[in-house]
């Protein structure tokens, strides 16, 4: 059963712009995790998308991440004519549906860029001409972005709709807990409906809170179909079928003492809702029309992850990512007793940050079995091998780091504390961490 929501002429909505399948797509991830909102694993959705991409024979979809996840950064990115146009926006965060209008004043405090103030004034004037209360609107959907301090910032759906339409975004995916919540008296109140009202051709949203496991399965299958050239509706039907025929959602501990393992089964295939105001067309041209795109080389010497995967430490990983990507932190130190997983955490951070494009190279330099007296030379030699370059000394390494964004991981430094060699290494690491966009 294929279910799609169409809202023709609802609220005198704008006609969607026509879209043609493209040879290369650009997907923008907005992963918003305000410090004063409930924390959920920020890697679930992106991992599913990146895994789906790796299964494709042709790399014709480029993924980037909005850092920081602020309204100002989003507006700046979408209007940047020197960068490729964004075709798909995937918002991963919290959504709020306000029935009483009590959140309107809080939303007004959000730092709106100058360009978007004009859009907001247009919306207010249009609402006032209809006798509506624009200052504190009721039955309104909001998405929780971050502000400049990393706190939550409410952004109204109709403002996002205007911005996305003017930049001709073809598909918006809302992986937020209440992004498709609707009021029985006003179908235009939800975020998804307002985006459709604004003329976005396709909006995929969740009708209820979604289990993290379900979100991973859903988006892995949805994007796999979408990236092979299927229409949006067909890709969602494929994902729904996958959820329907495999209701297992992992193991849970139940019973007295919580020592009985049971398989959690959920029939949640209906949770994703597709809103369409135009024809169901493909975003990506069929593979036969285009030759494979070359994938930029990303060099690293990290060991392969454990077959069982990496679990936990999601807050710590997010803290490291935010420090490097948003707070302009140059050096990050992980300390603790032996056996707590410091090295495993650093390795996973390296894999993730190079996979998501924050760095182009990662080099791990371990001193666990080191017995020499010149740790700087060992670091330079390891970088030479990893980067496939001839680096003669620390200055040459610094020049290479300044040219290419690189993450250096210095591990087991406690072995150097017995003599004076640790100070020499830290002095070199200081200069390396300040070379261009590289970090330590």
Image: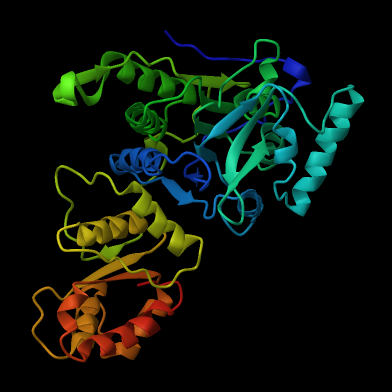
Q: Is residue 153 left or right of residue 264?
A: right
Q: Which residue occupies 30% across, 60% down?
A: 350
Judge whether 113 appears above or below 15 on screen.
below
Q: Is residue 295 visible?
A: no
Q: Is residue 255 left or right of residue 116?
A: left
- Return the x and y of residue 68 as percentages of the image width and height: 54, 54
Q: How many marks?
A: 0
Q: Which residue occupies 46% across, 36% down?
A: 284
Q: Which residue occupies 50% across, 32% down?
A: 176
Q: In which quarter of the view is residue 73 placed?
A: bottom right
- Return the x and y of residue 183 as percentages of the image width and height: 64, 15
Tell me how the rendering is colored. rainbow
> Which of 327 and 118 lies nearest the eye of the viewer?
327
Quadrant (top left/top right/bottom left/bottom right) for the C terminus:
bottom left
> Which of 350 and 49 lies nearest the eye of the viewer?
350
Q: Is residue 266 visible?
A: yes
> Which of 40 and 399 lies nearest the eye of the viewer?
40
Quadrant (top left/top right/bottom left/bottom right) for the N terminus:
top left
- Return the x and y of residue 431 as percentages of the image width and height: 39, 84
Q: In which quarter of the view is residue 339 placed?
A: bottom left
Q: Is residue 45 left or right of residue 145?
A: left
> Which of 3 and 205 lies nearest the eye of the viewer?
205
Q: Which residue occupies 34% across, 44% down?
A: 58
Residue placed furthest toward the top: 1
- Return the x and y of residue 323 as percentages of the image width and height: 45, 62
Q: Is residue 415 left or right of residue 42?
A: left
């Amino acid at each position: 059963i294929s279910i799609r929501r169409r809202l023709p002429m609802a609220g005198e909505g704008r006609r969607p712009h026509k879209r043609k399948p493209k040879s290369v797509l650009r997907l923008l991830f907005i992963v918003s995790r305000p410090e004063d909102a409930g924390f959920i694993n920020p890697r679930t959705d992106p991992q599913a998308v990146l895994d789906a991409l790796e299964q494709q024979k042709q790399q014709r979809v480029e993924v980037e991440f909005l850092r920081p996840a602020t309204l100002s950064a989003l507006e700046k990115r979408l209007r940047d004519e020197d960068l490729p146009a964004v075709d798909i926006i995937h918002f991963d965060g919290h959504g709020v549906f306000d029935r009483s209008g009590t959140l309107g004043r809080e939303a007004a405090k959000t730092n709106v860029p100058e360009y978007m103030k004009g859009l907001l004034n247009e919306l207010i004037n249009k609402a006032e001409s209809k006798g509506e209360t624009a200052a504190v609107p009721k039955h309104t959907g909001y998405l929780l972005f971050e502000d400049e301090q990393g706190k939550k910032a409410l952004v109204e759906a109709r403002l996002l709709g205007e911005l996305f339409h003017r930049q001709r975004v073809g598909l918006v995916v809302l992986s937020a807990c209440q992004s498709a919540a609707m009021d029985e008296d006003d179908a235009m109140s939800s975020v998804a409906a307002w985006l459709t009202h604004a003329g976005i051709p396709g909006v995929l949203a969740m009708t209820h809170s979604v289990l993290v496991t379900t979100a991973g399965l859903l988006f892995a299958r949805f994007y796999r179909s979408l990236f092979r050239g299927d229409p949006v509706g067909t890709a969602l039907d494929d994902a729904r079928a996958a959820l329907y025929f495999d209701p297992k959602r992992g193991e849970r501990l139940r019973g007295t003492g919580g020592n009985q393992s049971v398989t959690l089964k959920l029939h949640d295939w209906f949770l994703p809702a597709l809103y369409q105001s135009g024809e169901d067309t493909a975003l990506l041209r069929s593979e036969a029309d285009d030759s494979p795109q070359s994938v930029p080389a990303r060099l690293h010497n990290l060991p392969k992850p454990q077959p069982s995967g990496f679990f936990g430490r999601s807050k710590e990983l997010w803290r490291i990512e935010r420090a490097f990507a948003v707070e302009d932190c140059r050096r990050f130190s992980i300390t603790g007793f032996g056996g707590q997983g410091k090295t495993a955490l650093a390795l996973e951070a390296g894999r993730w940050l190079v996979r998501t494009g924050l760095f182009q190279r990662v080099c791990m330099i371990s001193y666990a079995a080191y017995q020499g007296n010149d740790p700087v030379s060992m670091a330079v030699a390891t970088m030479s091998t990893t980067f496939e370059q001839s680096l003669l000394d620390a200055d040459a390494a610094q020049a290479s780091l300044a040219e290419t964004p690189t993450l250096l991981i210095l591990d087991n430094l406690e072995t150097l504390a017995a003599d004076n060699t640790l100070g020499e290494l830290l002095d070199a690491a200081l200069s390396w961490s300040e070379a261009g966009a590289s970090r330590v």
